[in-house]
Amino acid sequence: MSTLVKATDITKDYGQDGVVTHALRGVSLSLQPGEFAAMVGPSGSGKSTLLNIIGGLDRPTSGTVEVDGQRLNDLGKSALGELRRDHIGFIFQSYNLLPVLTARENAEYVLRLQGVPAAERRRRVTEVLAEVGLAGMEDRFPRQLSGGQQQRVAIARAVAPEPALVLADEPTANVDSKTGQSLLDLMLRLNQDKGVTFLFSTHDPAVMQRARRLILLKDGEVAGDGEGLEDIDGV
């Protein structure tokens, strides 16, 4: 099985007023296709920073990242944008939906960027919105949807282009626990039925319980990596 993500010796430093903050200190990890993994650890441990670097939203200070066989360090801005568009889906805790677009239009946004024909866009988006429980709500705007429904649209937008990898940054943080459980069940079903690979950054115990692999970050370093809570000391 080929490796989907390979991050090697990643460091990330931030400097301000002569003070350097070491957000990541030599992090290495890999993901295989079909994994359902979560990065956990205290605030400031580097989870979101690493997620953004793996997703090509940020550049490491040093180290290398490969996603789906492409080395991000070697890609220019345009090529990096194409890799994100075609290979990576993103789910954010703030949803990041476009308020002037309907649920359908938000969900098909990346497909439009990919140049997918209108009939195929409609078929795929109708199918995925039904899968996330939003059949009949395709023409509603974000303001007409609850927080949980907006996050379902965000999940649909992430998976409709059929990416190799979905990166989810605290996807249950802004919804109630019942809705969060439902969203997690949905993402796990997409993982199992469609083989979508998920990597979470989370503080949510419900995500940790469902993840088949936990990666513990502390002070910008990998402090544990295992298949369950019992395998990681300190969670």
Image: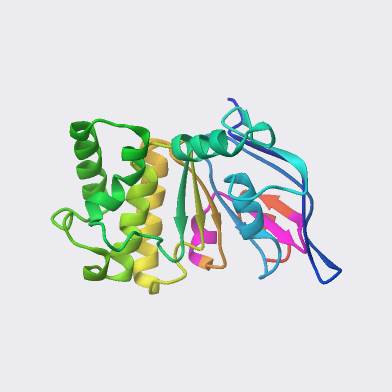
Residue farthest right in this picture: 18
Residue 163 is situated, as x and y percent measured from the top left of the image, at 43, 37
Q: Give the range drawn in magenta.
A: 206-223
Q: Is residue 57 above or below residue 6?
A: below
Q: Can see residue 214?
A: no
Q: Is residue 197 left or right of residue 48?
A: left
- State which quarter of the image contains the C terminus: bottom right
The number of numbered discs placed on residues in the rendered structure image is 0
Residue 120 is situated, as x and y percent measured from the top left of the image, at 22, 32
Which quadrant of the figure has residue 8?
Answer: top right
- Nearest to the observer: residue 153 or residue 16: 16
- State which quarter of the image contains the N terminus: top right
Q: Which residue is rendered at x = 72% and y = 66% of the image?
A: 234
Residue 67 is situated, as x and y percent measured from the top left of the image, at 59, 35
Residue 116 is situated, as x and y percent measured from the top left of the image, at 29, 31
The scheme the figure's colours follow is rainbow
Q: Is residue 84 above or below residue 150?
A: above
Q: Which residue is rendered at x = 19% and y = 39% of the image?
A: 122
Q: Which residue is rendered at x = 32% and y = 49% of the image?
A: 156
Q: Which residue is rendered at x = 43% and y = 72% of the image?
A: 174
- Nearest to the observer: residue 16 or residue 9: 16
